[in-house]
Amino acid sequence: MWKDKQDGRRSDDVESESNGASLEPMRQDPGQDVSAFVGKGVVFKGTITYNGTVRIDGTLEGEIHTDGILLVGEEAVITAKVTAGTIVCKGKITGDIHAKDKMKLRAPAIIDGGVTTPVLSIEEGVLFNGTLEMGQAAPQYQREATPLHSVGISAEPAIRRVSA
C-alpha cells in the first residue's frame, strides 16, 4: 500500500529528503516500512496510537503513543504529549516527550518542553528549550557491572638491585 510514492521513491527511502539531509533513526529491516505518513500541509488533531514507523511532515496537535519509531520532518509542527520508542526530529515539537529507547535531534529541530530519554543525540544548530531527564539506559545500552577487586601492596621494593 505504501510501497511506491508518487515521486517514485519507496517508503523505506524515507531516510533521505530532497536536500540530502537524513532522518534515518537507523537502517531498518527491508520488510519494515513507514506505517503512516502525515504530509506537508495536513493538519491533524487527536491521538495517534500505532506500531511501526510514522513520519510527520504536517501539523499535529494532541498525543502520540507508540513503542515504534517517530520521524518528524523539517517542516513538521507538533504540539503534543509524545511517547515513542525512538524519535528522530528535524521539525518543531512543543510538549512533553518520552523516548523509551533514544532521541535524535537534527538541525534545524526546535524542542520546547520536557524530554525524558535514556539516550540523546543533538546536532549543532538544534534549539532545545526545556528540561532533560536521562534515566537508566534501555537494556541494550546498559553496561555490564564489573566487580572491583582490591589490589594488594607488597612490602618488597618494585625494583631489585643486583650486585655484581
Image: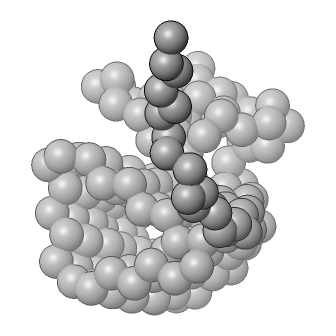
Q: Residue furthest top?
A: 164
Q: Is residue 89 left or right of residue 64?
A: left
Q: Residue furthest front?
A: 164
**What colouring method underlies this structural image?**
one colour
The image position of residue 115, as x and y in percent, is 38, 80
Asked if residue 82 is positioned above or below residue 30 in the image, the reply reads below
Q: Residue furthest right?
A: 31
Asked if residue 103 is positioned above or below residue 106 in the image, the reply reads below
Q: Residue at x 59, y 29 (%)?
A: 13
Asked if residue 136 is positioned above or below residue 38 in the image, the reply reads below
Q: Residue at x 18, y 46 (%)?
A: 124
Q: Residue at x 63, y 62 (%)?
A: 151
**In this orientation, which residue lies closer to the viewer: 10 or 144?**
144
Quadrant hosting residue 60? bottom left
Q: Is residue 160 left or right of residue 138?
A: left
Q: Is residue 118 left or right of residue 66?
A: left
Query: Does residue 71 appear in this view?
Result: yes
The image position of residue 148, as x and y in percent, is 67, 68
**In this orientation, which residue lies closer to the viewer: 11 or 114?**
114
**In this orientation, which residue lies closer to the viewer: 52 or 159?**
159
Quadrant hosting residue 23? top left
The image position of residue 93, as x and y in percent, is 31, 72
Asked if residue 162 is positioned above or below residue 17 in the image, the reply reads above
**In this orientation, which residue lies closer to the viewer: 110 or 3?**
110
The image position of residue 46, as x and y in percent, is 52, 88
User: Which part of the image, by quadrant, shows the N terminus?
Assistant: top right
Query: Does residue 38 appear in this view?
Result: no
Picture mark count: 0
